[in-house]
Amino acid sequence: MSLDLRAFRDALGRFATGISVVTTCPEGGEPQGMTVNSFSSLSLEPPLILWSIQNNSDCADVFAGAAGFAVNILRDHQEDVSRHYASKGHHALIPGTFRRGATGQAVLDDCLVSLECEVWRRYDGGDHTIIVGRVLEMASHAAAQPLVFFGGQYRHLR
């Protein structure tokens, strides 16, 4: 059986996802971030989440050596934030748009949810690395709406 990879990618795009920016503060470097939609919850006990990064991403080395990170789930008005950190070479966090969280990780301003994590495990995932994080701190804006991605476009819940 031969799988048409373009058709496979298009089929996966029919799954609506939230959008997040994963941030980290590398040892001796500037805080970095990248847009992902590969974020998922994993476990309540212990509190674990996961996300994946493409192995040839220009951020792969930064996250490969990171001991921790934050997942910043974007609100419906943050499409510009998503687009910025999705662009190749635009991963240094913009001064004045984030704070250091309780764990020292960079937490973006005005997000729907921010989860500060320590790296729990990394797994080979084909052309991606799956990163599992143990959640240590959390902030949430319960009344806000999420930014959603579906069919190759940003969407808003109504």
Image: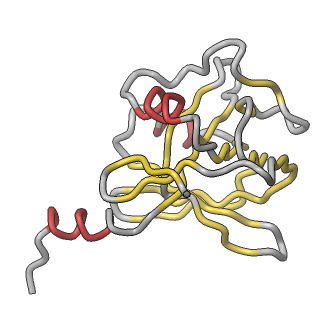
View extreme (top): residue: 95
Q: Position of residue 143 (x, y in %)?
A: 78, 51
Name the residue: 87% across, 49% down. 137
In the rendered image, the quadrant that contains the N terminus is bottom left
What scheme was used to colour the molecule?
A: secondary structure
Q: Position of residue 106 (x, y in %)?
A: 74, 30
In the rendered image, the quadrant that contains the C terminus is bottom right
Q: Position of residue 6 (x, y in %)?
A: 15, 62
Q: Position of residue 64 (x, y in %)?
A: 55, 43
- Is 140 rendered above or below residue 34? below
- Is 37 rendered above or below residue 105? below
**Residue 56 relative to residue 48: left or right:** left
Determine which quarter of the picture holds residue 74. top right
Name the residue: 67% across, 46% down. 71
Q: Nearer the viewer, residue 135 or 80?
A: 80
Q: Nearer the viewer, residue 70 or 149?
A: 149
Name the residue: 33% across, 57% down. 127
Name the residue: 40% across, 22% down. 89
- Is 113 rendered above or below residue 110? below
**Residue 18 relative to residue 12: left or right:** right
Q: Nearer the viewer, residue 2 or 124?
A: 2
View extreme (bottom): residue: 1
Q: Nearer the viewer, residue 25 or 21?
A: 21
View extreme (front): residue: 158
Determine which quarter of the picture holds residue 48. bottom right
